[in-house]
Image (cartoon, rainbow, N blue to C red):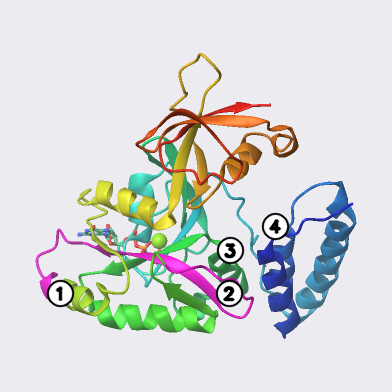
Amino acid sequence: MPTNLPPQYFGAEKAFRLARVPEEKIAALEEMLAIMPKHKGTDHLRAELRARIAKLTQVSAKKTVTHRASTVIPKEGIAQVAIIGLPNAGKSQLIAKVTNASPTVADYPFTTHTAIPGMMEFENIKIQLIDTPPLVPSSIEFWLTNLLRRAEALMIMVDLDSDSLVQMEAITAALGKMRIELVSGKAEEEQTGIVYHKKVLIAANKIDLSQTKESLVALEENFRDKLPIVVISAKNGIGLEELKLKLYEMLDVIRVYTKAPGDKPDFSEPIVLSRGATLEDTAVEVHKDFLARLKYARVWGSGKHAGIMVRRDHIMKDGDIIELHI
Ligand SMILES: Nc1nc2c(ncn2[C@@H]2O[C@H](COP(=O)(O)OP(=O)(O)OP(=O)(O)O)[C@@H](O)[C@H]2O)c(=O)[nH]1
Ligand SMILES: [Mg+2]
Protein backbone atom coordinates (compact mmCIF):
# COMPACT_ATOMS: atom_id res chain seq x y z
CA MET A 1 0.00 0.00 0.00
CA PRO A 2 1.42 3.43 -0.86
CA THR A 3 2.27 5.67 2.07
CA ASN A 4 1.79 9.02 0.24
CA LEU A 5 4.15 10.99 2.44
CA PRO A 6 4.01 14.77 2.00
CA PRO A 7 7.27 16.63 1.17
CA GLN A 8 7.48 18.14 4.68
CA TYR A 9 7.96 14.61 5.99
CA PHE A 10 11.28 14.31 4.23
CA GLY A 11 12.30 17.68 5.66
CA ALA A 12 11.61 16.38 9.16
CA GLU A 13 13.45 13.16 8.35
CA LYS A 14 16.47 15.18 7.30
CA ALA A 15 16.25 17.18 10.54
CA PHE A 16 16.27 13.84 12.38
CA ARG A 17 19.42 12.74 10.61
CA LEU A 18 21.10 16.06 11.46
CA ALA A 19 20.00 15.98 15.11
CA ARG A 20 22.75 15.45 17.63
CA VAL A 21 21.04 15.11 21.00
CA PRO A 22 18.10 12.89 21.99
CA GLU A 23 15.71 15.82 22.58
CA GLU A 24 16.31 17.13 19.09
CA LYS A 25 15.87 13.64 17.65
CA ILE A 26 12.62 13.19 19.56
CA ALA A 27 11.33 16.55 18.29
CA ALA A 28 12.07 15.55 14.68
CA LEU A 29 10.45 12.12 15.11
CA GLU A 30 7.36 13.69 16.66
CA GLU A 31 7.20 16.07 13.74
CA MET A 32 7.41 13.14 11.29
CA LEU A 33 4.64 11.39 13.19
CA ALA A 34 2.43 14.47 13.19
CA ILE A 35 2.90 15.07 9.47
CA MET A 36 2.36 11.46 8.40
CA PRO A 37 -1.12 10.71 7.07
CA LYS A 38 -3.04 8.18 9.17
CA HIS A 39 -4.10 5.18 7.11
CA LYS A 40 -3.35 1.47 6.80
CA GLY A 41 -0.35 2.06 4.55
CA THR A 42 1.43 4.01 7.28
CA ASP A 43 0.47 1.82 10.27
CA HIS A 44 3.82 0.09 10.36
CA LEU A 45 5.88 3.25 9.92
CA ARG A 46 3.92 5.08 12.62
CA ALA A 47 4.42 2.22 15.08
CA GLU A 48 8.13 2.25 14.31
CA LEU A 49 8.36 6.01 14.92
CA ARG A 50 6.52 5.67 18.24
CA ALA A 51 8.90 2.92 19.33
CA ARG A 52 11.90 5.08 18.48
CA ILE A 53 10.44 8.03 20.40
CA ALA A 54 9.80 5.81 23.43
CA LYS A 55 13.37 4.53 23.39
CA LEU A 56 14.89 8.00 23.01
CA THR A 57 12.64 9.37 25.76
CA GLN A 58 14.15 6.82 28.16
CA VAL A 59 17.66 7.88 27.16
CA SER A 60 16.93 11.57 27.62
CA ALA A 61 15.12 10.98 30.94
CA LYS A 62 18.27 9.31 32.30
CA LYS A 63 20.34 12.32 31.34
CA THR A 64 18.04 15.11 32.51
CA VAL A 65 15.55 15.44 35.29
CA THR A 66 13.50 18.15 33.61
CA HIS A 67 9.96 17.30 32.71
CA ARG A 68 9.38 17.19 28.99
CA ALA A 69 6.27 19.11 28.00
CA SER A 70 4.01 17.70 25.31
CA THR A 71 5.41 19.03 22.07
CA VAL A 72 2.70 18.71 19.51
CA ILE A 73 -0.46 20.80 19.66
CA PRO A 74 -3.04 19.33 17.27
CA LYS A 75 -3.87 21.73 14.47
CA GLU A 76 -7.36 23.17 14.39
CA GLY A 77 -8.93 25.76 12.13
CA ILE A 78 -7.37 26.74 8.83
CA ALA A 79 -3.86 27.33 10.18
CA GLN A 80 -1.70 27.34 13.28
CA VAL A 81 0.03 30.63 14.04
CA ALA A 82 2.48 30.90 16.94
CA ILE A 83 2.85 34.25 18.70
CA ILE A 84 6.39 34.95 19.76
CA GLY A 85 8.19 37.82 21.43
CA LEU A 86 10.25 38.95 24.38
CA PRO A 87 8.90 38.92 27.97
CA ASN A 88 5.96 41.26 28.70
CA ALA A 89 5.32 42.16 25.05
CA GLY A 90 1.61 41.36 25.39
CA LYS A 91 1.41 37.93 23.71
CA SER A 92 -0.94 36.48 26.32
CA GLN A 93 -2.98 39.69 26.36
CA LEU A 94 -3.64 39.34 22.63
CA ILE A 95 -4.62 35.67 22.95
CA ALA A 96 -6.97 36.57 25.81
CA LYS A 97 -8.53 39.33 23.70
CA VAL A 98 -9.06 37.65 20.34
CA THR A 99 -9.45 33.94 21.15
CA ASN A 100 -11.49 31.72 23.46
CA ALA A 101 -8.41 30.94 25.60
CA SER A 102 -7.58 32.77 28.82
CA PRO A 103 -3.85 32.62 29.53
CA THR A 104 -2.48 34.57 32.50
CA VAL A 105 -1.64 38.19 31.68
CA ALA A 106 0.63 39.88 34.18
CA ASP A 107 2.84 42.93 34.53
CA TYR A 108 5.91 40.85 35.36
CA PRO A 109 8.05 39.03 32.75
CA PHE A 110 8.14 35.24 32.17
CA THR A 111 4.46 34.75 32.98
CA THR A 112 3.87 32.12 30.28
CA HIS A 113 5.72 28.80 30.56
CA THR A 114 3.84 26.53 28.17
CA ALA A 115 2.19 26.76 24.79
CA ILE A 116 -1.49 27.71 25.04
CA PRO A 117 -3.69 27.39 21.96
CA GLY A 118 -6.78 29.49 21.32
CA MET A 119 -9.16 29.82 18.40
CA MET A 120 -9.64 33.17 16.69
CA GLU A 121 -12.69 33.73 14.53
CA PHE A 122 -12.39 35.76 11.36
CA GLU A 123 -15.46 36.11 9.14
CA ASN A 124 -16.48 32.49 8.42
CA ILE A 125 -13.20 30.81 9.35
CA LYS A 126 -11.13 30.01 12.42
CA ILE A 127 -7.40 30.46 12.87
CA GLN A 128 -5.54 28.79 15.74
CA LEU A 129 -3.22 31.11 17.66
CA ILE A 130 -0.66 29.74 20.11
CA ASP A 131 0.68 31.67 23.08
CA THR A 132 4.30 30.81 23.83
CA PRO A 133 6.87 31.50 26.56
CA PRO A 134 9.16 34.47 25.91
CA LEU A 135 11.79 33.87 23.26
CA VAL A 136 14.94 34.29 25.32
CA PRO A 137 17.77 31.74 25.41
CA SER A 138 16.90 30.49 28.92
CA SER A 139 13.36 29.48 28.00
CA ILE A 140 13.92 28.05 24.53
CA GLU A 141 13.47 24.32 24.78
CA PHE A 142 13.30 21.71 22.06
CA TRP A 143 9.54 21.49 22.18
CA LEU A 144 9.27 25.22 21.48
CA THR A 145 11.62 24.93 18.51
CA ASN A 146 9.53 22.06 17.25
CA LEU A 147 6.30 24.00 17.72
CA LEU A 148 7.55 27.03 15.78
CA ARG A 149 8.88 24.86 12.96
CA ARG A 150 5.53 23.10 12.64
CA ALA A 151 3.37 26.25 12.71
CA GLU A 152 2.07 27.54 9.38
CA ALA A 153 3.13 31.07 10.28
CA LEU A 154 4.43 33.23 13.11
CA MET A 155 3.35 36.50 14.65
CA ILE A 156 6.09 38.57 16.25
CA MET A 157 4.80 40.69 19.12
CA VAL A 158 6.89 43.82 19.53
CA ASP A 159 6.50 45.96 22.65
CA LEU A 160 6.51 49.59 21.47
CA ASP A 161 7.16 50.68 25.03
CA SER A 162 10.77 49.60 24.58
CA ASP A 163 13.28 49.57 21.70
CA SER A 164 11.69 47.73 18.78
CA LEU A 165 14.94 47.10 16.91
CA VAL A 166 16.63 45.53 19.92
CA GLN A 167 13.64 43.19 20.22
CA MET A 168 13.64 42.31 16.52
CA GLU A 169 17.35 41.56 16.68
CA ALA A 170 16.95 39.28 19.71
CA ILE A 171 13.98 37.50 18.16
CA THR A 172 15.57 36.92 14.76
CA ALA A 173 18.76 35.71 16.47
CA ALA A 174 16.74 33.20 18.52
CA LEU A 175 14.92 32.05 15.38
CA GLY A 176 18.24 31.73 13.56
CA LYS A 177 19.46 29.31 16.24
CA MET A 178 16.31 27.27 15.59
CA ARG A 179 17.13 27.35 11.86
CA ILE A 180 13.95 29.35 11.20
CA GLU A 181 14.15 32.07 8.59
CA LEU A 182 11.48 34.72 8.05
CA VAL A 183 10.17 35.25 4.55
CA SER A 184 7.79 37.84 3.17
CA GLY A 185 4.19 36.84 2.46
CA LYS A 186 4.72 36.18 -1.22
CA ALA A 187 7.82 33.99 -1.14
CA GLU A 188 7.54 30.34 -2.03
CA GLU A 189 7.84 28.17 1.01
CA GLU A 190 10.49 25.55 0.79
CA GLN A 191 10.85 23.06 3.60
CA THR A 192 14.36 21.76 3.22
CA GLY A 193 14.77 20.32 6.69
CA ILE A 194 17.85 22.48 7.12
CA VAL A 195 16.17 25.87 7.10
CA TYR A 196 12.50 26.35 7.89
CA HIS A 197 10.97 29.29 6.03
CA LYS A 198 8.10 30.99 7.85
CA LYS A 199 5.77 33.75 6.90
CA VAL A 200 5.42 36.33 9.63
CA LEU A 201 3.26 39.24 10.70
CA ILE A 202 4.77 41.83 13.04
CA ALA A 203 2.29 43.13 15.61
CA ALA A 204 3.52 46.41 17.09
CA ASN A 205 1.76 46.45 20.46
CA LYS A 206 0.94 48.99 23.19
CA ILE A 207 0.26 51.92 20.84
CA ASP A 208 -2.09 53.27 23.54
CA LEU A 209 0.98 54.31 25.56
CA SER A 210 2.39 57.79 25.01
CA GLN A 211 6.11 57.20 24.47
CA THR A 212 5.84 54.76 21.58
CA LYS A 213 6.40 56.90 18.48
CA GLU A 214 10.17 56.55 18.21
CA SER A 215 10.08 52.78 18.58
CA LEU A 216 7.32 52.49 15.95
CA VAL A 217 9.09 54.73 13.41
CA ALA A 218 12.30 52.72 13.78
CA LEU A 219 10.40 49.47 13.29
CA GLU A 220 8.59 50.72 10.20
CA GLU A 221 11.69 52.21 8.63
CA ASN A 222 13.62 48.99 9.00
CA PHE A 223 11.00 46.35 8.29
CA ARG A 224 8.13 47.88 6.30
CA ASP A 225 9.60 46.80 2.95
CA LYS A 226 10.34 43.25 4.09
CA LEU A 227 7.53 42.12 6.36
CA PRO A 228 3.90 43.09 7.02
CA ILE A 229 3.36 45.21 10.15
CA VAL A 230 0.17 45.97 12.05
CA VAL A 231 -0.07 48.50 14.86
CA ILE A 232 -2.25 47.46 17.80
CA SER A 233 -3.15 47.80 21.42
CA ALA A 234 -3.98 44.29 22.60
CA LYS A 235 -5.21 45.74 25.87
CA ASN A 236 -7.48 48.47 24.51
CA GLY A 237 -8.58 46.63 21.39
CA ILE A 238 -7.02 49.02 18.86
CA GLY A 239 -6.18 47.59 15.41
CA LEU A 240 -7.40 44.08 16.15
CA GLU A 241 -9.71 43.83 13.12
CA GLU A 242 -6.84 44.86 10.89
CA LEU A 243 -4.62 42.31 12.62
CA LYS A 244 -7.10 39.53 11.80
CA LEU A 245 -7.34 40.64 8.18
CA LYS A 246 -3.57 40.89 7.72
CA LEU A 247 -3.07 37.50 9.31
CA TYR A 248 -5.63 36.02 6.96
CA GLU A 249 -3.98 37.69 3.95
CA MET A 250 -0.58 36.43 5.00
CA LEU A 251 -1.82 32.84 5.04
CA ASP A 252 -2.46 33.23 1.31
CA VAL A 253 -5.52 31.00 1.12
CA ILE A 254 -8.77 31.13 -0.82
CA ARG A 255 -12.30 30.18 0.18
CA VAL A 256 -14.48 28.09 -2.11
CA TYR A 257 -18.11 27.09 -1.45
CA THR A 258 -20.00 24.02 -2.58
CA LYS A 259 -23.63 23.70 -3.61
CA ALA A 260 -25.93 20.87 -4.64
CA PRO A 261 -27.71 21.21 -8.03
CA GLY A 262 -30.69 23.54 -7.69
CA ASP A 263 -29.65 24.63 -4.18
CA LYS A 264 -28.06 27.76 -2.79
CA PRO A 265 -24.43 27.52 -1.60
CA ASP A 266 -23.62 27.22 2.09
CA PHE A 267 -21.52 30.29 2.85
CA SER A 268 -20.99 29.29 6.48
CA GLU A 269 -18.69 26.40 5.59
CA PRO A 270 -15.96 27.41 3.17
CA ILE A 271 -13.43 24.96 1.82
CA VAL A 272 -10.13 26.63 2.52
CA LEU A 273 -7.35 25.98 -0.01
CA SER A 274 -3.89 27.29 -0.79
CA ARG A 275 -3.83 29.91 -3.51
CA GLY A 276 -3.35 28.15 -6.84
CA ALA A 277 -5.41 25.08 -5.86
CA THR A 278 -7.28 23.33 -8.68
CA LEU A 279 -10.75 21.86 -8.96
CA GLU A 280 -9.22 18.46 -8.24
CA ASP A 281 -7.65 19.73 -4.98
CA THR A 282 -11.05 21.12 -3.97
CA ALA A 283 -12.89 17.88 -4.75
CA VAL A 284 -10.45 15.88 -2.59
CA GLU A 285 -11.06 18.25 0.31
CA VAL A 286 -14.79 17.59 0.05
CA HIS A 287 -14.30 13.84 -0.01
CA LYS A 288 -11.22 11.74 -0.73
CA ASP A 289 -13.19 9.45 -3.06
CA PHE A 290 -14.10 12.38 -5.30
CA LEU A 291 -10.65 12.31 -6.89
CA ALA A 292 -11.58 9.09 -8.68
CA ARG A 293 -15.32 9.63 -8.95
CA LEU A 294 -15.55 13.24 -10.12
CA LYS A 295 -17.08 13.45 -13.60
CA TYR A 296 -17.35 17.19 -14.01
CA ALA A 297 -18.00 20.36 -12.08
CA ARG A 298 -19.72 23.68 -12.69
CA VAL A 299 -18.31 26.91 -11.31
CA TRP A 300 -19.90 30.23 -10.44
CA GLY A 301 -17.95 33.29 -9.42
CA SER A 302 -14.47 34.52 -10.35
CA GLY A 303 -16.19 37.45 -12.05
CA LYS A 304 -17.02 35.99 -15.43
CA HIS A 305 -18.18 32.40 -14.87
CA ALA A 306 -21.83 31.57 -14.44
CA GLY A 307 -22.20 27.85 -14.01
CA ILE A 308 -19.65 26.92 -16.67
CA MET A 309 -18.22 23.42 -16.80
CA VAL A 310 -14.58 23.26 -15.84
CA ARG A 311 -11.80 20.71 -16.07
CA ARG A 312 -9.97 19.07 -13.23
CA ASP A 313 -6.97 21.38 -13.61
CA HIS A 314 -9.10 24.53 -13.42
CA ILE A 315 -7.49 26.99 -10.96
CA MET A 316 -9.99 28.00 -8.29
CA LYS A 317 -10.45 31.63 -7.24
CA ASP A 318 -11.42 33.13 -3.91
CA GLY A 319 -15.20 33.15 -3.53
CA ASP A 320 -15.90 30.55 -6.24
CA ILE A 321 -18.97 28.36 -5.86
CA ILE A 322 -18.79 24.82 -7.23
CA GLU A 323 -21.22 22.07 -7.98
CA LEU A 324 -19.49 18.68 -8.05
CA HIS A 325 -20.97 15.96 -10.27
CA ILE A 326 -19.92 12.39 -9.61
N1 LIG B 1 -0.63 49.62 27.91
C1 LIG B 1 -0.69 48.39 27.41
N2 LIG B 1 -0.29 47.36 28.15
C2 LIG B 1 -0.36 46.12 27.61
C3 LIG B 1 -0.85 45.89 26.30
N3 LIG B 1 -0.80 44.55 26.04
C4 LIG B 1 -0.31 43.98 27.16
N4 LIG B 1 -0.06 44.93 28.10
C5 LIG B 1 0.47 44.73 29.47
O1 LIG B 1 1.77 44.19 29.38
C6 LIG B 1 2.00 43.27 30.45
C7 LIG B 1 2.45 41.93 29.87
O2 LIG B 1 1.39 41.33 29.14
P1 LIG B 1 1.38 39.78 28.84
O3 LIG B 1 0.30 39.54 27.88
O4 LIG B 1 1.39 38.99 30.10
O5 LIG B 1 2.80 39.65 28.14
P2 LIG B 1 3.51 38.33 27.54
O6 LIG B 1 4.14 38.74 26.26
O7 LIG B 1 2.55 37.21 27.47
O8 LIG B 1 4.62 38.08 28.64
P3 LIG B 1 5.40 36.69 28.99
O9 LIG B 1 4.37 35.63 29.21
O10 LIG B 1 6.17 37.02 30.22
O11 LIG B 1 6.29 36.41 27.83
C8 LIG B 1 0.68 43.18 31.22
O12 LIG B 1 0.77 44.04 32.33
C9 LIG B 1 -0.34 43.68 30.23
O13 LIG B 1 -1.45 44.27 30.87
C10 LIG B 1 -1.28 47.03 25.54
O14 LIG B 1 -1.74 46.94 24.41
N5 LIG B 1 -1.16 48.23 26.14
MG1 LIG C 1 2.53 35.44 28.39
Q: Can residue 78 be seen in this view?
A: no
**What residue is shown at x 77% (from left), y 48% (from top)?**
38
Q: In which quarter of the image is ligand 1?
A: bottom left
SS label for mark 2: loop
Front label number (4 vs 2): 4
- Give whichever of discs 1 and 3 has the lower sequence position: 3
| Residue 189 in the image, given as x and y percentages of width and height | 52, 68
Which residue is under mark 2? 141
Q: How far apart are marks 4 and 2 (CA)?
A: 19 Å
Which residue is under mark 1? 217
Q: What residue type is labelled 1?
A: Val
Q: What residue type is labelled 2?
A: Glu
| Residue 278 in the image, given as x and y percentages of width and height | 56, 46
SS label for mark 1: helix
Segment colored magenta: 187-215
Q: Residue 150 carries which label?
A: 3
| Residue 324 in the image, given as x and y percentages of width and height | 60, 28
Which residue is under mark 4? 34
- Give whichever of discs 3 and 2 has the lower sequence position: 2
